[in-house]
Image (cartoon, rainbow, N blue to C red):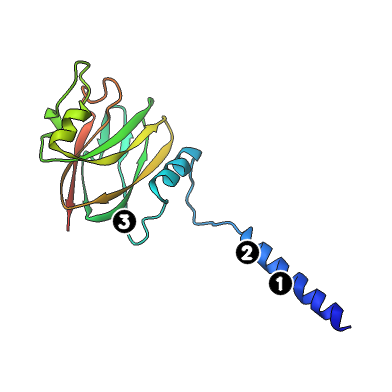
Amino acid sequence: MRLSLIGTVAIVLLGAILATGCGSSDDGETKTAATTENEAASGGGSAGGGQQLTIKMGDYFFAPANGSAKAGRTVIEAPNEGAVEHELVVFKTKLDPAKLPTDTSGGVDEEKLDEVAEGAGEVPDVEAGETKSGDFELTPGKYVIFCNLPGHYAQGMYGTLTVTK
């Protein structure tokens, strides 16, 4: 009888452990495989006390074109509502976003920009209809945002991000 009681308790405990390990998170957030890959590469999906900022991408514009955020850890979500692939590149600089150094193809020369600006990161290769996000540590100041896929910057796909304390 005593052995039967110990076996029953062991089975109940094992069942509870397995149920906890197999639970799913239903936080209402839908993620694509690309979003999950990007979160893994950037160190996680939630900003752990940080903030979330959404910058929508359309065909050759950002909305908002001139965003703002508080300093600190920020997850920037970038849904692509356009018909072609886009990316969101973020650099800290006081340069006018319309006058960034360009290469011979008209795209932003990120190597030259590195000499006068501080690269904060990017949300790369977001296909039409997809959403990806990136995890950024933003410090107070002015930032430029732009899409550096061929021809996109030249068509006006750039903007600003102002980060305050």
Give the residue number, with chain letter if any, for mark 2: 20
In the foreground, 50 or 14: 14
Q: CA distance from mark 3 to mark 1?
A: 38 Å
Quick check: marks 2 and 3 in contact, CB under 8 Å? no
Q: Establish if 138 lies above or below 3.
A: above
Going by the image, does 52 lie left or right of 101?
Answer: right
Q: Position of residue 6 (x, y in %)?
A: 80, 78
Of the two numbered discs 3 and 1 in the rendering, the one whose residue sits closer to the viewer? 1
Name the amino acid type tagged 1: Leu
Q: Position of residue 21 (x, y in %)?
A: 62, 60
Q: Earlier in the sequence, mark 3 or mark 1?
A: 1
Residue kind at label 2, given as amino acid type: Thr
Q: Amino acid at mark 3?
A: Gln
Disc number placed over residue 150 in the picture, else none: none
| Helix, strand or loop under label 3 | strand
Q: Secondary structure at mark 2?
A: helix
x 64%, y 58%: residue: 22
Q: Pointer 3: residues within 10 angstroms few (<14), some, or many (20+)? A: some
Q: Secondary structure at mark 1?
A: helix
Q: Earlier in the sequence, mark 2 or mark 3?
A: 2
- Report how far apart the C-alphas of labels 2 and 3 lie in the structure: 28 Å
Residue at 58 percent across and 56 percent down: it is 24
Percent coordinates x, y for residue 160 in the rendering: 18, 40
**Residue 13: which numbered mark, if any?**
1
Q: Residue furthest top?
A: 104
Q: Of label 2 and label 1, which has the lower sequence position?
A: 1
Q: Is residue 35 left or right of residue 51?
A: right
Question: What residue sits 43% from the left and 33% below the top?
Answer: 129
